[in-house]
Image (cartoon, helix red, strand yellow):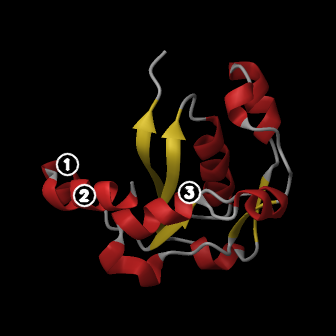
Amino acid sequence: MLKTFAALKQKSAVFADIFSPDIIMPVPLHPKRLRYRGFNQSLVLAHIFYKEQKEKIDCHNLIRIKNTRAQTTLKGDERRLNVINAFSLNNSEKVKDKQIVIIDDVFTTGTTVNECSRILLKAGAADVHVLTLARVRE
């Protein structure tokens, strides 16, 4: 399946205009979920979307400090409450005045990426963009 996404990226004009940020941040998993799953799907997508800019991928600064329930099991209001204060930064100075793109696999309500964006903007990021593979339409 990853080869399919990589081929799609190379052949699709949609990807020609992907924003080129200072920092690329995959949405982090909590360490327990990462151990259980064995990989971070957002990090895998970051490597596909930004194959030529891998040195910009930062998967250590934005961290998930709260082991939240899976968002897929929750409704809108529950999703928002689930991720409040779930993320933190190891080093706020690294994002100050930077253009950042957050990578996530699926955009449903936007709650997760909004919370990540809030943390980054609060720390002084100049701008935050979001890139997802799929969007759920209600």
Q: CA distance from mark 1 to mark 2?
A: 8 Å
Residue at 43 percent across and 70 percent down: it is: 47
Name the residue beneath numbered marker 1. 14
Q: Is residue 121 left or right of residue 74?
A: left
Amino acid type shown at disc 1: Val
Residue at 16 percent across and 51 percent down: it is: 12
Figure check: 60 above or below 32: below
Please tell me the numbered disc located at residue 41. 3
Q: Is there any visible trace of residue 126 in the rendered image?
A: no
**Mark 1 Cα shell of 10 Å, populated few (<14), some (14-19), many (≥20):** few
Q: CA distance from mark 3 to mark 1?
A: 21 Å
Figure check: 34 above or below 81: below
Residue in front for this viewpoint, 93 or 48: 48
Amino acid type shown at disc 3: Gln
Looking at the rendered image, the quarter that the N terminus falls into is bottom left
Q: Is residue 17 left or right of residue 63?
A: left
Q: Is residue 106 left or right of residue 49?
A: right
- SS assignment at label 3: helix
- SS assignment at label 2: helix
Q: Position of residue 113 (x, y in %)?
A: 59, 45
Amino acid type shown at disc 2: Lys
Please tell me the numbered disc located at residue 9. 2
Q: CA distance from mark 3 to mark 2?
A: 16 Å
Residue at 81 percent across and 31 percent down: it is: 81
